[in-house]
Amino acid sequence: MDTINLFFLVITFFITLKLVSTWWESRGKPPGPFALPFIGHLHLITSSFAIDLAKLADRYGPVIFLRFGSRPAVVVSSPSAVEECFSKNDVVLANRPQLLVGNCLGDNFTYLGWAPYGSHWRNVRRSANTELFATGRLNYYAAVREPEFNSFVKHLFRRSVGGHREVHLRKAFVDLISNCLLAMLLGKRYYGEDVEGSEDAKLFQELTEESLRFIITPSLGDYLPLFRWIDRQWTGKKMTTLARKRDAFMQRLIDERRKMQENGGVEAKCVLDALLSNQSEDPDFYTDRTIKGIIEALLAAGVDTVYYTLEWGLALLINNPNIMKKARDEIDFHVGHDRMIQESDLPKLSLLNDIINETLRMYPPAPLAIPHEAAEDCTIGGFKVRRGTMVMVNILAIQTDPKLWEDPWSFKPERFKADAEAKGRLKWLVFGHGRRSCPGAAMALREMTTILGALIHCFEWESVGDKKMDMNVNAGFFMPRANPLVAVCEPRKPMIDVLSKL
């Protein structure tokens, strides 16, 4: 009996000690719902991640504490909290969580999106900005993007005059954006009808699709320690095998391009050419490994976010034909009917730009910003945030907050003209904020706006069966349409002469 009493006394002591320890650690933490043992708050995520978190913010406030399995997280959902995160705490929150995918597919956290804040990250980001995202380089590569845009429009025109007016736009958008990015980065095309049968194109598409599946699917072991060993042995080995295949493919492209430069003195026509030229001047930094990391990181981030927005934008315009007409009138006035819209026209097309801004406000491609991780203890909104805590910004919650935006779920591009400073007051956060904001924002906006402008300028659009476009969102961490966009297009009579000459 004494042994049993001693046993229960010891158990009671350790339980009490744990409860006291938990209470002590929780002092000053942000509020949040009750966490279940082992899984924490994972049970609260039932549909769209950002929408579920927005509901919690309505109940507990703009700064809430959650636990995803064993991983603590703070979610912020107000402009003031975002400003505190990325002004006062910008350096403290400049790291990314170390997840399995970043280790296996990010070459041990050396790729741009996964690298911890420090000299390597700064050098890689500077290189990406210099060779692709700087204004001068964006202008230079406009001549590379324009043929891809025209080829896309030409394809739609030929299909429509051939009787195929119903267009499945998701694949067409993916092919277009992928080829634009590939042309700039590698001087290659791996998508579309003209590369069907190409073994390289097939392999590249397979590697890209498999990589994307791992990136968008959370690994249980990152959040539940019980699964960590299994995850590393199963998912981790699959990722490592994929990484080796990607590495071999990219190394072959690098060797091929290097040989072309050595034999013919090829002018730097793509980012890979420029990086190889930099390698001759600074071989210690621009190793083949670093070059592959820069190229692969840019390829991973530059397609889905753009095609999501194009699908949503065109669907919104089909459902709002009066706004489409105003945008078309604006383009007709500034561009006319004797040529295609060009990127140089964009500064004059204020309504078209605001249509993209409004689409991104309502349907941000990544409604929850890529997580940050606190490098040391800090405070947000007066609450303590401990080192190692994930910090997440709920972009969707902020961009659809009725206290910040009047009638937030109505499509009103004119709101950006009425409130010219809306994007500067941390109410519009599509590309993040602070030093780890998206470096490719300017390029993505150029692509989205030019492509959508070309579709408005060249074609009449309507939904299949004259029904309203459905606006259902796919559940998950990102925000694509639940159903791929299908629409009916008819060439505009004033543009037929231009289209027939493409």
Image (spheres, rainbow, N blue to C red):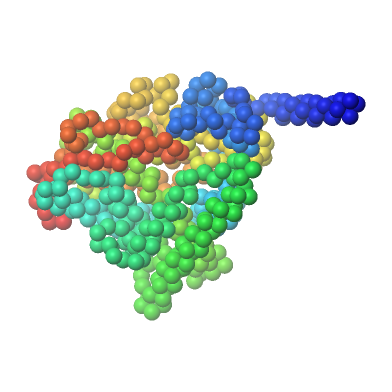
Closest to the observer, 1 or 498: 1
Residue 457 appears in the rendering: no
The picture places residue 239, in percent across and down from the top left corner, at 52, 56
Q: Is residue 108 above or below residue 282?
A: above
Tell me which corner region of the image, top left, top right, bottom left or bottom right, holds residue 264.
bottom left
**Whether residue 454 is situated above or below residue 421 in the rendered picture:** below
Q: Is residue 248 visible?
A: yes
Q: What residue sits 18% from the left and 43% below the top?
A: 166
**Extreme residue in the bottom direction:** 263
What residue is at 42 percent from the left and 35 percent from the top? 475
How far across and how far down the image is residue 500, in percent?
Answer: 11, 54
Front-lying residue, 144 or 333: 144
Is residue 480 found left or right of 121 in the rendered image? left
- Where is residue 28 shown, x and y percent of the image? 68, 25
Q: Quadrant of the C terminus?
A: bottom left
Q: Nearer the viewer, residue 65 or 428?
A: 65
